[in-house]
Amino acid sequence: MQRLWGPIEWVATAVCTIGEGLERRVAELWAARELPLASMLDSVGSGAVESLAEYVNDLLCQESIPLGLPVTNRVSPGYGYWDVSQQKALFALCPGDAIGVSLNEACFMSPVKSISLMAAAGTHARVDHYFSQCARCWMRDCAYRRTPAKKTVHR
Ligand code: SF4
């Protein structure tokens, strides 16, 4: 991770989920051959869990920046060069059972609309290595914002 993040002093792991409700409804819609609706609802679920993961990343940022520790962008097992089998190591640090998220043998999470993530912090951490985290951050009154949000920061 040093290649992406530079020198870091802390790492944080998290698992977040929107639960099983949406997945169940998508399955019902598929069974009823309501394919466009099923597909659209599934996309909404993907967007929702991504937003949740972003929110977690931004909360870490809000906690750490006042301590002089910029927070990196998040990464997840299975993305880029990080092998999905590393989910097991991440879950060892941050078990998902408290929120009902489990891993199967192939390291896929259940409920499906779940994201595990790791972010880091450090005085000299490289925070904007591929895009500015602030550009899509929802923190409305953040005193440390480096660039305006591209979309509304209202929720
Ligand atoms: S606006 Fe930027 S510095 Fe502030 S919490 Fe969001 S990502 Fe972090």
Image (cartoon, helix red, strand yellow):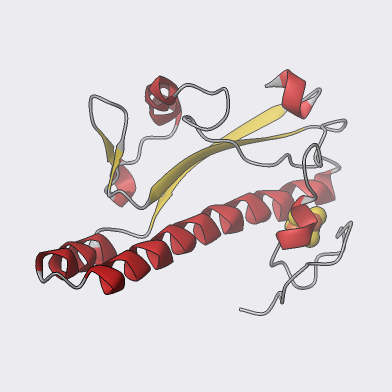
Above or below 107: residue 140: below
**Quadrant of the rendering where the N terminus is positioned:** top right
Picture coordinates of residue 107, whole percent (x, y) = 32, 28
- The quarter of the displayed image where residue 44 is located: bottom left
| Outermost residue toward the left in this view | 31
Residue 24 lies, in percent from the top left, at 18, 63
Residue under the image location 79 percent in, 32 percent down:
122
For this view, does 149 lie left or right of residue 80? Answer: right
Q: Which residue lies furthest to the bottom in this view?
A: 154
Viewer-proximal residue, 43 or 83?
A: 43
Residue 94 in the image, given as x and y percentages of width and height: 43, 34
State the image coordinates of residue 21 (x, y, percent, origin top left).
24, 65
Q: Indicate the quadrant of ligand 1 in the picture.
A: bottom right
- On the rendered structure, is 119 left or right of 47? right
Which of the 4 image quadrants contains residue 42? bottom left
Which quadrant of the view contains residue 75? top right
Residue at the spot x=89%, y=56% of the render? 146
Q: Residue at x 30, y 44 (%)?
A: 101
| 128 relative to 80, above or below | below
Q: In which quarter of the image is the C terminus?
A: bottom right
Numbered marks: total: 0
Left or right of 57? Residue 27 is: left
The residue lying at 47 percent from left, 21 percent from top is 83
Task: Name the side, left or right, on which 136 lies relative to 45.
Answer: right
Asked whether 125 or 51 is in front, the reply is 51
